[in-house]
Amino acid sequence: MEPPPLLVLYGSETGNARDVAERIAREAARDGGGHTMTRRPRRRVHCLPMDSFEVTQLPTAPLIVCVCSTTGQGDPPANMRQFWRFLLRKSLPPDSLADVKFAVFGLGDSHYQKYNVAAKKLHRRMRALGAVELVGLGLGDDQHPTGYEATLDPWLDTLWRSLGHGTDAEGGHGDKTDLVEDLVLDPCRVAVDVVAPPPVGTTQHESHDNVEDRVRELCDAARELDRALEAAAAIPPRLLRGTHETVGPNGEVAGTMTVASSSGHAFGEYHPAVATVTVNTPLTAADADAEVRHLEVATADLRRAPANSESTTGISDVNADERSPLYTPGDCLAVLPLPLAECDVTRARDATGTVLERAGLAPDAWVTLRAAGGRLGSRSEFISKPVRAASLVEGALDLTSASARRYFFEVASTFASHPQESERLRHFAGKDGRDELWYYNERERRSVGEFLSDFPSVAMPLEWMLTTAPRLRHRLFSISSSPLPHPHALHLTVTAARWKTHYGRVREGLCSNVLRRCVSTFIFIRAIRLTAQVCFVYSAQVGAALACWLVPTSMAQPKDTTPLVLVCTGSGVAPLRAFVQARVHRSRAGQTKIAPSLVFFGCRRKAGDFLYRREWEELAGDPVALVGDASTRQGPGGQVLEGGFIPAFSRDGDTKDYVQHRVAHHAARVWNMLEAGAAVYVAGSSASMPQDVRDTLSQVVEACGRMSRDDAGVYLRRMEASGRYVVEAW
C-alpha cells in the first residue's frame, strides 16, 4: 500500500529554511534518511515555498512539515506571509485541520529577543486548528556551537520514527554506518547543455567596458538559473493562480497541486540599477577595532529601473519627477555584491575558472539550462536562454565567501576520484561526521573555492555545482540620510566585516567589503604644449559602480509630532540619523510642531569611532534641532520634554559606560518622553545591547511610573504592539 504523500512547506528569507526543507524532502524520498532501496513503496514528496501552495487546500494534505525562519522584529519571511495571514482568519473553525498531521521546525538566533517566534506561532496556530503533531516543535539555534543541525538531526530521527521510516523488513531500525557507503544521488534538478557555436545574435561582453552590460549579463544568467529551478520544482513563474502536475518516484503523474506566483518585482535582485558611488570616506580612525565608512550613492541612477526582463531596450524611467522623494527614512538599500571592482573581478574569475575546469567547460562556453525531472521535481520542457558559463557561475554563486551546506559535501563525495578524499567527504556527509564537518566548514568559514583547493580530485559537474553551492544573495543596508537635505545622494554607514578564525585565517564579509572597495578613482590626463614646454595635468573623478535597488521596510518614519527616544550603537546610527535629519530639515525650514528627539549613541572611544562626531556636536549645540518646537516641549501631563544628544564611550573611562547606563542615568527625561507618547527605536548589534536596553527601560518604567515589574513589562509590550517600540538589530 502506498504511503500518504508528504508536503514540505518552507518560509525562507536568506535560504537556510529552504535548505532544511529540501533536505527533509530528500531524506523522506529516501525512506527517512536511508540510502538504499527498500521493499516498501516510496512516499511521494512535494517541497514548495508556503506562498506557492494554495493554502485553502491545506485541510486535504494528510502529512505536512513546515520549516520557517524569523525575520525583522519577529516577522514571518516574505514567502510565508500570505500563508500565515490565511491561517489567522477568525472564520476558520477550530477543527479545520483535524485530518492533518504536522511538524514544525524553526530556524532562529537566540541572541534576538524574539527567538524563533514565527515557528512558535505557526506551531500553536496549527494545533489550535485541530492538526495533530507528528513530533514536537523543533527549534534550530545559530548560536549553538555546531549550528542549527545540532537540533535538526535528532528532530529528524524522531520524525522518521513517527512516520515509520528507516526500519528494516522485520520492523527494527536498520544500522546506520558513519560512512554513506551506498549513496545514490537523486537526479539533479537542472541539466546543462553546451551550445556550440554561440547562438546567432547573442552578444558577448568579454571586455565589459560598459558596467551596465556586465551587470545585465550576470543578472540575466542568474535569473535563467532560477527559472530552471522553478520549472523543476513545478512553480511556474508569473502565474498568479493555477495547477500543475506532480510526479511520483517513477515519473508517473501523481496528481495536481495549485500554486501561486513566485515572481518578484521588476526592480529587484535580478534587475538592479547600476548606481554610482560618489563618496566613500572612513568614519573611524585607522587603529579602530572596526572600519566604518560613509558612502554616498547617486539617486539619479536609482530613478532609472531596468526594463522588463523580456525587453532589450535596457533601462526606463520609473520616477521622472526629480522633485519627489525617492525614499523615506527607515528604508534600505539592497546591494547585490557582483564582482565589479577590478580586485573582485580577479578573485571571482579565479574561483570561476576552477569550477569550470573541474566541470570540463571553458569560461567562454555557451550553455542552456533544462529543468530536469526527479523525485522532487516535475516533468517540464523549460529550456533557458543561452548564457555564458562564466557569467552563470559569477552571477549566481558565492564561491569566495559563503560556506556550503552538508548536502554539498554529500554530493561532492560521489565526484571525488581520490579514495581518501571520497572517504573523508562521505564521513562529513554522515551524521557521525557532523561535528567534524562543522569544525572544518562552519567554524573556519571555508568558501567553496577553498574547498576545491583542499579536495583537488572533486570534479563536480556544473549542474550539481549550480544546485548545491551557496547562491549569491543581496544584503540590506539601512539608509542613513533623509532625501530632504540630500536630494541627490543617499548615504550608507557601512561596517567592513573582518575577523580571524580559530586558526588565524582572515575572513571578510563579502558585501560590506565590496562596498568598502567602491572607491572613486582619479584619471590623470597630461597635455604638453611643445612650444613653451609647459606641462598641464588634468584630473577627473570617476565614481565606482554598484548593483543595487531600494527596499521599503517596516521601520517607518514617525510623525513629526511624536517625541523620539533613539538608542543606537556603532553603525546602528544609520536609520536613526535619517530620522533626525528629516526633522532637523523641517525644523530649520520653519515648520512648527516638531517634537523633541532624545538620542543615545554608544561606541568604544570618542577619538576613534565616534561616528558623525562633528554633525552630532553641531546638532547638540543647536537651540532648535533636537529640542523641538516650543509648542511640543510640554507633555500632556505638564512634564517638560528634553531632547538632546547623549553619547556613551565604553572604553574611555575606568569603568565601561554603555548606552543602557546613559538611559538609566537620564531615567526621568526618558520617562517624561514615554508618557508623552514617545516612540522608542533601538538599533545596533544584536549581541546583548537590545535586551540590555529593554531591561533598563523596564526598570525606568518600574521606578518612575511606580509600577510592579510585571506591569512595567506589560507597559513595554503595549508600546511594542502599537508600533512605539521598534528594534532594528543584526
Image: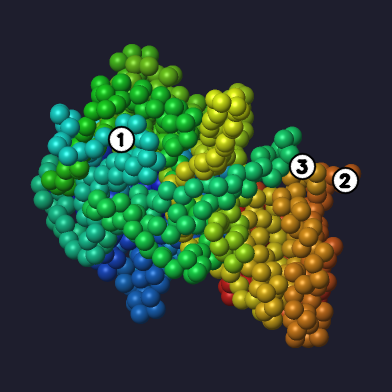
User: What SS does tag 1 mark?
Assistant: loop
Position of residue 269 relative to residue 101, above or below, is: above
Give the number of the mark in front: 3 or 1. 1
Of the two numbered discs 3 and 1 on the same chain, state the one appearing first in sequence.
Answer: 1
Give the number of the mark in front: 1 or 2. 1
The kind of residue on which mark 1 rests is: His
Of the two numbered discs 1 and 2 on the same chain, state the one appearing first in sequence.
Answer: 1
Of the two numbered discs 2 and 3 on the same chain, state the one appearing first in sequence.
Answer: 3
327 or 119, which is in the foreground?
A: 327
Q: Residue furthest front?
A: 531
Which residue is identified by label 1? 205
Which residue is identified by label 2? 653
Q: Quadrant of residue 622?
A: bottom right
The kind of residue on which mark 2 rests is: Gly
Residue 179, x across and y down, in percent: 36, 24
User: What SS does tag 3 mark?
Assistant: helix
